[in-house]
Amino acid sequence: MRATVGDQLVQHGRVVGQQDKVGEIVEVMGQGGNPPYRVRFEDGHEGVCSPGPDTEIKHRFQQTGR
């Protein structure tokens, strides 16, 4: 899993009815785009994430359709 600053991190809900948790990657702490990532979530809090299998990265170019 590789990401750059500005990409979107989406943690999918693990239980029926649980919403996805979406945030913007504000810092890539690993080498070559690898985790861990510092992420600012929609509710304003920030955290350091090492994404698991229930997480996807939406790259900036995918979000804008370029």
Image (cartoon, grey):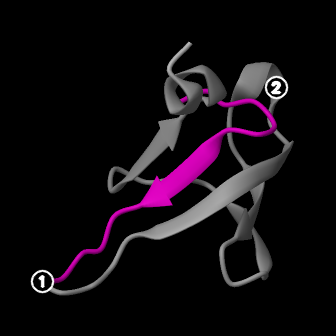
Q: What element carries label 1?
A: loop
- 16 and 35: which one is in front? 16
Q: Which residue is drawn at 24% across and 75% down?
A: 14
Q: What is the total number of numbered labels drawn onto the structure image?
A: 2
The reply to whether residue 35 is visible in this rendering is: yes
Q: In the rendering, at what x and y percent does residue 61 appear?
A: 60, 20
- Residue 46, compared with residue 4, is above or below; it is below
Number of the label disc, if any, that sits on residue 31? 2
Q: In the rendering, at what x and y percent does residue 41 appear?
A: 68, 71
- Dot 1 corresponds to which residue? 16
Magenta region, mostly helix, strand or loop?
loop
- 60 and 27: which one is in front? 60
Magenta segment: 1-15
Name the residue furthest left.
16
Quadrant of residue 6 in the image?
top right
- Quarter of the figure with the C terminus: top right
Which of the two marks, 2 or 1, is nearer to us in this view?
1
Q: In the rendering, at what x and y percent does residue 45 appear?
A: 78, 82
Quadrant of residue 50 in the image?
bottom right
Query: Amino acid type of disc 1?
Result: Val
The reply to whether residue 37 is visible in this rendering is: no
- Residue 55, compared with residue 35, is above or below; it is below
- 9 and 2: which one is in front? 9
